[in-house]
Each structure stands twice: as C-alpha cells, then as structure tokens.
Amino acid sequence: MAVYPGSFDPPTLGHLDIMRRASSIFPNLTIAVVKNPKKQTLFSLAERQSMIRDMLQAEGMEHVAVDQFEGLLVKYMQRSGKRVIIRGLRATSDFEYEFSFAAMNRTLDKNVEAVYLMANESYTFVSSNLVKEVVRLGGDLRQHVHPLIYPKLLERLGLSDSASS
Ligand code: ADP
C-alpha cells in the first residue's frame, strides 16, 4: 500500500527512523530505492538495497519489503498497486521541494497521496550527503549511521575504522 522512495546513498538512522514510523502506520510498506542513471552514487543500486535489507533485519523489521524503481515514481506505484508515498521532513528547507514533489505526483495521478513524517529531533540535520561529506573528511558520525553500514561507508571512502575516530 505505502512506498518510501529515496536514494538511500547510504541509508542513515534518519531513514531508519522514518521506516519504523511508517511501518507502524502502514503494515504493508515497501522501501523503493531509486535507480537514476544520471546521478552518480557512492553505492550501487544492489548495495543500497542490500544495506537496507540488512539494517531492517537487524532491527526486527524484516516484514518491510525492499524494491527498486527507475523512472517515474507514480508509474512504479501504478504497476505495483501502491497509493501512498511516504517522505521524511527535516527542517523547513525540505518543505519547498517536497511540496512541489507532492503536487507534481498528484498532477500525474490524482489517486496518489503523500504522507510526510518527521524523524526524531536528533536526526533533523542528518542527510546522506552530509554524512558522506563529513565522514570523508574524517568526522565520526557513528551515531547517525547503523553499525552494519558504517564500516561499509568507511571502506568505500577508503578510510580505515581508526582513521575516523
Ligand atoms: P532523495 O534523493 O529522494 O531525496 P534521500 O535518500 O535523500 O532520497 O531521502 C529520502 C527521503 O527521506 C526524503 O523524503 C528525505 O526528506 C527523507 N529523509 C532523509 N533523511 C532524513 C532525516 N534525517 N529525517 C527525516 N527524513 C529524512
């Protein structure tokens, strides 16, 4: 019924928090990882999906499905019989983009509804991009990334575990 789409490059604890909240409202939740050939990602599509699966399993949330899509989100939703889009809202800075995203999707398919959830305040400033940037520069962001994913992030950035602590 509900789909939480995103890049998840990499998934953060902010994402996990939204997944947990969404699955408590929508028992039939699918995380849909976007495949955007034009966007350079640190992790491949398969890696991002597998990191999300590992994280969900470790958190006892294996009932949440993980899928992928390419192209228009509403087309993917029509194909898979989903109606609700879950998105996370951090600060007001997310609002403008999300507002047009929701309006655009509604224009494309009037049956689609977007539901916005707010993560715990401690994740307000957590984004995949900032995490990548800060960890690349040697910052320790273990409190924002799941312990199963953090070592993979260090490895991909060519850092050893001790280098960031
Ligand atoms: P996209 O490229 O589609 O924005 P992201 O993986 O960056 O993909 O984000 C997916 C969704 O998760 C977006 O709705 C984003 O606002 C939300 N999100 C990401 N990080 C957080 C966070 N720390 N707290 C709440 N929502 C978040």
Image (cartoon, helix red, strand yellow):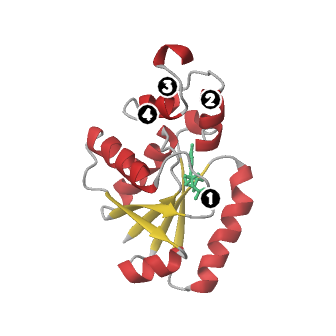
- Crowding at mark 3 (Cα within 10 Å: few <14, some 14-19, many 20+): some
Residue position for label 4:
152
In the image, what residue type sits under mark 2?
Answer: Arg
Instruction: Decide if residue 165 is in sight here.
Output: no
In the image, what residue type sits under mark 1?
Answer: Lys
How far is disc 4 from disc 3 in space, using C-alphas? 12 Å
The foreground one among 146 and 26 is: 146
Instruction: Please give the name of the residue rendered at 30% of the width and 61% of the height, measured from the top-left corner.
Output: 27
Tag 2 near tag 4, CB within 8 Å: no
User: Tag 1, which secondary structure?
Assistant: loop
Mark closest to the chain's N terminus, 4 or 3: 3
- Crowding at mark 4 (Cα within 10 Å: few <14, some 14-19, many 20+): some
Please state the horizontal and vertical placement of residue 100, each as a whole percent of the image.
Answer: 70, 70
As drawn, the residue found furthest toward the front would be: 158
Q: Is residue 133 above or below residue 88?
A: above
Residue position for label 2:
136
How far is disc 2 from disc 3 in space, using C-alphas? 13 Å
Residue position for label 1:
39
Instruction: Please give the name of the residue rendered at 55% of the width and 76% of the height, measured from the top-left corner.
Output: 72
Front position among marks 3 and 1: 1
Mark closest to the chain's N terminus, 2 or 4: 2
How far is disc 2 from disc 1 in space, using C-alphas? 19 Å
Residue position for label 3:
142
Q: Is residue 102 above or below residue 136?
A: below
Mark closest to the chain's N terminus, 2 or 3: 2
